[in-house]
Amino acid sequence: MRQFPLEMHHMEPGRVVEWRLRSTAGAAADGGAGDAPGDAAGDAGGDAAGDAGGRRASFNQDKHFTVAEESRGADDPVASWVAVTFEVAGALDEQALTRALLAFVRRHEVLRCEFRRLAGELACEPIDVGELALDTAPVADFDSADELLGFLVERFTRSIDTLSWPLFTMGAVLREDSATVYLAFDHIVCDGLSMPIVVHEVQNAYEALLRGEDIGVPPAPSYLDFAEEQRRRYLSIDADDERLGYWKSFMARSGGEFFPRFPLELGVEPDRMYPIVNEASTLLDAAEAEVFEKACRAVDGKPFMGVLAAVAVCLREAGGPGVYRGFMPLSERGRGGWANSVGWFVNTLPIEFDASPGRDFAQVIAAVRAGFGAMMEHIDVPFVRAWQLLAPTEFAARSWPYPVNFFSYIDARKCPGADRHEDWRPTSHVWSARANGACSWFQRDADGLHMNSLYVDTAAARRTMEDFQESLRGTVREIARHGAFRRPIALTSPRRAVGTPLDAAPYARHP
């Protein structure tokens, strides 16, 4: 599974259909209507948590919803989505997929939620599983791949609205011998690691139905329970709470700033948002990634530590500081029973370590390992709560105050269903309308190590990110070949063109 811009997808055209979620409660009250054709109300079982009565949103959800409210009121909408696609072999059985999708939505309480502001609190109102139905809606026939992708980008952007239910859209591109299924979500109901769960559950349910098997599965542990537990532990703390000590010490060493600055020039002005560049490339092929991992293990490091060490050294060589400071998103699924649950289980914490000139690969890895260990001791302190208490002025704004240093790494080989990714060919895609900085996500899969970056569309940012990506590609390859930083990292004039663009072609089926 790999993350890259949707526009890069080599998706064959075809007939597009969509599945539109609705509640039957209103119709039932009027004496009307039942489930859509193909529904199986018992497919996902009941859900005691979905009874009447609101639940409270998580810190992440509350902040996200608040930004949407404020931007809408200022006629300055903040738009974004996260999407997943996957392939189905053979002619699609629309009724079976309808049942599989409905079972998936019923299984995850957060997908059934409507969000409402009540007396200042953001409440989640789960719709009962028995009141959900899916309607199949024909959309259009596409003869051109470019027209199809243009439609999907526009469709996701138009249909995903934080302030309106449902908070996701589902559809498929049908052909005679294959189909591409797509689902796009608002971030308020999911995170990046939810995407392989989506693929795994929908595909398994669909294939079981084709075999004539029952797909009854129990409700997944609910993200809303996770949110409730988090609020119970941290809603009452204040800025003097000792659990904020890690954040405070980080800020003290960062000149009092809560947000670690991206250290290279992006050409942005204060308090201004910009259109973005969304691009992806391959850093290492499969064989190189295996050797890179061995080089990291040889110095008691993990592959993500090696990538982070390379990032730190490249930033330093391009003019950044010797001490790396940045944000790192971390999944909190593993701390409870939520390993296979959909939701926004991401906490964001600061990490810092020494990558000063003269330190070799083993020394930088040791520093990364120590910095990561210190960070992990404080993983359960919610980022949004720390932000609210320690940087209240910045918290009141609708975006991070300036370009922020951000690093994310996912090994897709460890995700649910990874053993079927060759058949399903899942892809994930993120999109945002505007930004004021740069974010990079790194993914390891069976084909190698890849990078997806979103950054501001300015001339300075394009130059900076092109140089940085080429420098990083050279650095990780040097580590793979020699287990060391063997050459000067910084690029020299004339500037070289970025090589090895990501090859997205294997992720689509071709006639």
Image: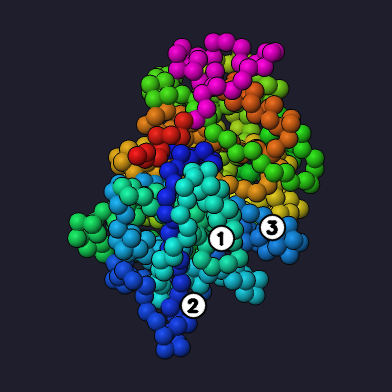
Please tell me the numbered disc located at residue 159.
1
Residue that numbered label 2 is attached to: 53
- Identify the element where label 3 is drawn: loop
Marks 1 and 2, Cα distance to the nearest angstrom?
27 Å
Mark 2 vs mark 3: in front: 3
Query: Do tag 2 and tag 3 residues touch (Cβ < 8 Å)?
Result: no
Magenta stretch bounds: 473-502
Marks 2 and 3, Cα distance to the nearest angstrom?
30 Å
Q: Is residue 280 left or right of residue 253?
A: left
Query: Do tag 1 and tag 2 residues touch (Cβ < 8 Å)?
Result: no
Residue type beneath disc 3: Pro
Residue that numbered label 3 is attached to: 77
Q: Is residue 488 magenta?
A: yes
Depicted 192 relative to depicted 101: above or below? above
- Residue 290 position, x and y percent, is 38, 23
Marks 1 and 3, Cα distance to the nearest angstrom?
14 Å
Q: Report whether residue 450 is seen.
A: yes
- Residue 80 position, x and y percent, is 60, 52
